[in-house]
């Protein structure tokens, strides 16, 4: 099974395997390539020695490259988890979106590229009945280890077209802030809420480095104006709104 009704080219990857323990994918996982050119990204994703692949790549000009059939497990998520379960590769369809990334000229995603991602995403979520809460960033399932597709990715635009969950972030304002070193019930509540949405986080009541990393991952996706790993009033309010929208 693969993309239907959309222009695309086939460049097969060699690294893939059978999905394990699932009937089919229930997550759409979005990445950026993090390398300077589409050609370099394709070289990496089709190199048998690299142990990495994806289902689709979207070029900056909107061209779609199909690399692994959706009934197979592409190797794009790496060590990751969501909702208490690992092996996100078995649960997901992975799209790599060409952008150099934070290390080299991270820039806005061109309109034509995002329109292609939207068309492809609509096709995937419809065929697999993927819920909006399961359209995720690589940074969501691998906080700290990955930060893509990053704060410039237009999640709101995708959600307006039926792909993913989005709420308008609460405005940044003065007020109390939870940050590294904080302890107590407020920290436990924050950790519980992040875990309730799906993030891999232990509820300890201790705002440690791991908690800050997960908070930043949440911000990269849902409160991109400021991604500092500190749970200010805007972050807390936005997280509450996301949880409410998830349950609606």
Image (tube, rainbow, N blue to C red):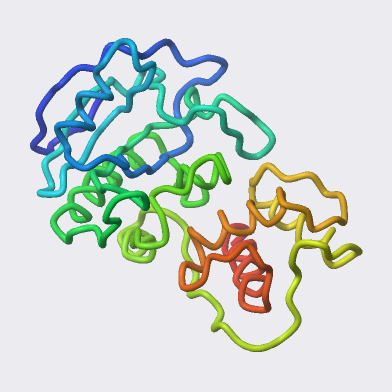
Judged from this view, the residue extending furthest toward the front is 104
Which residue: 74% across, 67% down? 179
Q: Say left or right for 86 vs 46.
A: right
Judged from this view, the residue extending furthest toward the right is 184
Which residue: 30% across, 60% down? 161
Q: Is residue 70 above or below residue 156?
A: above
Which residue: 49% across, 42% down? 146
Q: Disc count in the image? A: 0
Q: Quadrant of the C terminus?
A: bottom right
Residue 203: % across, % down: 83, 49
Residue 60: % across, % down: 15, 48
Residue 101: % across, % down: 33, 49
Q: Say left or right for 39 vs 224.
A: left
Which residue: 71% across, 86% down? 175
Query: Of residues 69 and 248, which is closer to you in this image?
Result: 69
Picture quadrant of residue 170 = bottom right
Q: Is residue 214 above or below residue 200?
A: below
Residue 221: % across, % down: 48, 58
Q: Quadrant of the N terminus?
A: top left
Query: Of residues 175 and 193, which is closer to you in this image?
Result: 175
Q: Is residue 201 above or below residue 66?
A: below
């Amino acid at each position: 099974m693969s993309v239907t009704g959309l222009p695309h080219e086939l460049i097969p990857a060699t690294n893939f395997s059978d999905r394990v323990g699932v009937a089919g994918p229930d997550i759409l996982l979005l990445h950026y390539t993090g390398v300077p050119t589409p050609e370099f990204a394709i070289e990496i994703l089709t190199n048998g020695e690299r142990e990495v692949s994806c289902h689709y790549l979207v070029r900056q000009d909107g061209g779609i490259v199909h690399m692994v059939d959706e009934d197979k497990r592409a190797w794009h998520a790496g060590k990751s988890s969501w909702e208490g379960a690992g092996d996100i590769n078995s649960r997901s369809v992975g799209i790599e979106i060409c952008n150099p990334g934070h290390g080299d000229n991270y820039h806005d995603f061109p309109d034509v590229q995002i329109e292609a991602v939207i068309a492809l995403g609509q096709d995937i979520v419809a065929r697999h009945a993927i819920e909006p809460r399961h359209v995720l960033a690589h940074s969501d399932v691998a906080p700290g280890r990955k930060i893509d597709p990053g704060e410039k990715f237009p999640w709101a635009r995708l959600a307006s077209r039926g792909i993913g969950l989005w709420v308008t972030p609460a405005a940044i304002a003065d007020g109390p802030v939870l940050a590294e070193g904080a302890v107590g019930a407020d920290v436990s509540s924050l950790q519980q809420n992040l875990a309730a949405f799906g993030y891999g986080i232990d509820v300890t009541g201790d705002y440690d480095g791991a908690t800050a990393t997960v908070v930043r991952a949440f911000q990269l996706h849902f409160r991109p104006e400021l991604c500092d790993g500190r749970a200010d009033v805007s972050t807390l309010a936005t997280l509450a709104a996301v949880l409410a929208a998830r349950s609606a």
